[in-house]
Image (cartoon, rainbow, N blue to C red):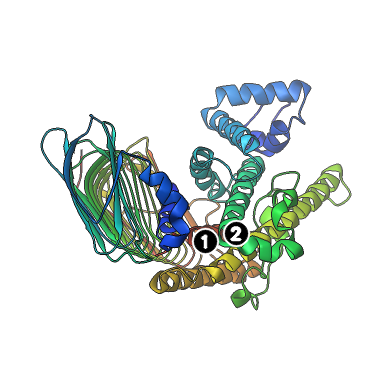
């Protein structure tokens, strides 16, 4: 978990949510911008060029993104008490909300976008979902949940206390949560996942580069091992359960201070391995002739390496 | 090993001096040749040079977001694996990466404190506008500090020297040139570590001050963050306790480093969270 851009952007959004009296300057400026509409309801359809960006931000409520036909972006947005700010250019559609007389209430965006649209979705206490878009996505929510299905390219998903659930991701995937859980299914490409206490469940991963880190969360990893790949799993107290194909080859290094190590693959002690007298246990072993480099480290968690069925 | 041979182990032993330009003549030629012919060591040198270059380009305060994004991933990739790789002397990598970490985190803290008002409150006592001036001249990495978190202050610190205990110093005869050099290095490491600790202390203190002022955050979010900080503090305490029994353990030092870095990251994130 790290400070990423969306927090800064959301900070700006939150400032926009300050009482109206504090926002006169911004409001005057906004009123002079003819391309921006201020309203509590938006129902409109605009065109978006291929590869364009849809940028949606709110404080409380929900963002729902789906796919539509052609190159059109269809927006249905309402805000209980806030003022919606909508702007559109051929390459970018933006929608956010600011308070009105110090109040905002819940805001809801339902937006359909062309396939391949780049999404920037931000919420403070709102839920976010995106389905079928198959484009780049940068999405973050503080206390809401985040659900993404079908994304491609640069994929960044972040939550603090909310959960992150995603499937069918193909690209450079970075996911972080603090106390929320992370569940990813069918991931292709480099993958990085971090939590503090949230659990991580990663299924169907096909990647040459995987790195996970958690403090107390548990990890369930099920994925292939590329012969040239590197796989690193770290935790402090969370258990690490790794399931890899029975025909995969890897050189494995596992280390734990007080946890246990179990493997379906034969483990052979090597010179330098130790684990006596309260010292960390370190094992290095190779199975199926080696290939991938797999590292699992935990202070007090248990490490389990299981075989799954053979995969090509 | 003869004078004309260079192994990966030897290369790593000399890496710090090599990167700092302290190796000349035939030995440098050997190191150059090894870096050119060994993929792993060559990649390591390349990474280090990139990190050094990126760290050097960071502005003193408020790094541009693009720079932050670029350096962030490199920090995550290089600070964390310091000890895990069990390299003999991954010092330069650790130090340069940590330098970037300190510079960036201090800058982010500056932004947070500036934005949320803690800066003025601390300016008189801690020199809030001079965070960068507190940075050590040479880059350093993190270390144990029991004072960071009052909740864990009862756990004895293992001392910063453990973090930099260079492998291979065991058995060096006292009074030898190597021993003198090792002692000198150790002192240098300790000095750097102490300086880094001061930076981290200050940053965590500032971030905590910011958090206390964030009454605009959702109480549930604050509670979640507090719980997570508790989880991290527990991890820090456990790592410290283990290190007390095995202070030279690279694995345990790494675990402690990871937990402390995680704490800074979480505090930093929390300080920058938007209002509800």
Task: Tell me the SS state at disc 1.
Answer: helix
Q: Is residue A121 visible?
A: yes
Say the numbered circle drawn on residue B271.
Answer: 1
Circles 2, 1 touching at the beta carbon (< 8 Å): yes
Chain identifier of the residue bearing label 2 in the image = B
Along the line of sight, which residue is nearer the eye, A39 or B91? A39
Q: Position of residue B45 (x, y in %)?
A: 60, 31
Viewed as shown, does residue B107 lie left or right of A301?
right
Q: Residue furthest left?
A: A69
Chain identifier of the residue bearing label 1 in the image = B
Residue A1's place in the image compared with A55, above or below, is: below
Q: Is residue B88 visible?
A: no
Along the line of sight, which residue is nearer the eye, A206 or B271? B271
| Residue occupying image coordinates x 78% and y 54% | B191
| Residue occupying image coordinates x 16% and y 33% | A71
Say the numbered circle drawn on residue B6.
Answer: none
Q: Residue furthest right?
A: B175
Residue labelled with disc 2: B113
């Amino acid at each position: 978990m790290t400070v990423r851009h969306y927090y800064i952007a959301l900070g700006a959004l939150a400032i926009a949510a300050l009482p109206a009296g504090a926002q006169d300057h911004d409001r005057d400026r906004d009123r002079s911008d003819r391309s921006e509409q201020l309203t509590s309801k938006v129902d409109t359809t605009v065109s978006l060029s291929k590869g364009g960006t849809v940028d949606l931000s709110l404080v409380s409520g929900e963002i729902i993104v789906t796919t539509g036909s052609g190159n059109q972006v269809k927006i249905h947005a309402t805000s209980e008490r806030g003022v919606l700010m909508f702007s559109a250019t051929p390459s970018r559609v933006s929608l956010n909300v600011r308070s009105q007389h110090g109040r905002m209430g819940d805001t809801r965006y339902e937006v359909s976008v062309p396939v391949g649209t780049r999404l920037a979705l931000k919420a403070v206490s709102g839920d976010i979902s995106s389905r079928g878009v198959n484009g780049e996505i940068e999405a973050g929510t503080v206390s809401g949940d985040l659900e993404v299905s079908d994304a491609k390219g640069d994929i960044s998903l972040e939550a603090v206390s909310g959960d992150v659930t995603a499937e069918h991701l193909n690209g450079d995937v970075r996911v972080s949560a603090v106390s929320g859980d992370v569940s990813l299914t069918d991931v292709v490409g480099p993958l990085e996942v971090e939590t503090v206490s949230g659990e991580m469940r990663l299924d169907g991963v096909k990647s040459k580069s995987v790195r996970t880190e958690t403090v107390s969360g548990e990890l369930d990893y099920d994925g292939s091992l590329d012969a040239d790949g590197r796989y690193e799993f770290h935790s402090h107290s969370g258990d690490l359960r790794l399931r890899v194909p029975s025909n995969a080859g890897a050189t494995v290094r596992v280390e734990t201070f007080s946890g246990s190590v179990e493997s379906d693959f034969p483990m052979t002690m090597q010179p330098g391995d130790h684990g006596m007298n309260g010292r960390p246990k370190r094992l290095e072993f190779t199975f199926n002739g080696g290939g991938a480099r797999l590292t699992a480290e935990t202070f007090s968690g248990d490490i389990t390496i299981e075989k799954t069925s053979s995969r090509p | 090993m003869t004078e004309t041979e260079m192994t990966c182990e030897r290369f790593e032993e000399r890496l710090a001096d090599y990167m700092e330009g302290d190796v000349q003549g035939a030995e440098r030629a050997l190191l150059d040749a090894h870096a050119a012919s060994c993929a792993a060591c060559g990649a390591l040198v390349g990474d280090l040079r990139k990190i050094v270059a990126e760290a050097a380009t960071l502005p003193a305060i408020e790094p541009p977001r693009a720079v932050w994004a670029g350096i962030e991933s490199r920090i995550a990739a290089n600070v964390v694996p310091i000890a895990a790789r069990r390299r003999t002397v991954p010092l330069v990598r650790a130090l340069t990466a940590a330098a970037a970490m300190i510079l960036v985190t201090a800058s982010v803290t500056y932004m947070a404190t500036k934005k949320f008002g803690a800066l003025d409150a601390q300016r008189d006592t801690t020199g809030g506008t001079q965070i960068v001036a507190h940075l050590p001249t040479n880059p350093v990495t993190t270390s144990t500090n029991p004072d960071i978190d009052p909740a864990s202050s009862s756990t004895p610190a293992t001392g910063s020297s453990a973090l930099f205990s260079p492998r291979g110093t065991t058995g060096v005869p006292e009074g030898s040139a190597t021993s003198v050099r090792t002692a000198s290095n150790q002192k240098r490491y300790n000095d750097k570590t102490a300086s880094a600790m001061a930076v981290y202390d200050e940053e965590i203190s500032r971030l905590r001050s910011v958090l206390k002022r964030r009454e605009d955050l959702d109480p549930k979010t604050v509670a979640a963050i507090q719980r997570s900080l508790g989880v991290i503090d527990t991890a820090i305490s456990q790592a410290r306790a283990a290190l007390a029994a095995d202070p030279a353990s690279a694995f345990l030092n790494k675990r402690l480093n990871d937990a402390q870095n995680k704490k800074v990251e979480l505090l930093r994130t929390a300080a920058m969270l938007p209002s509800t």
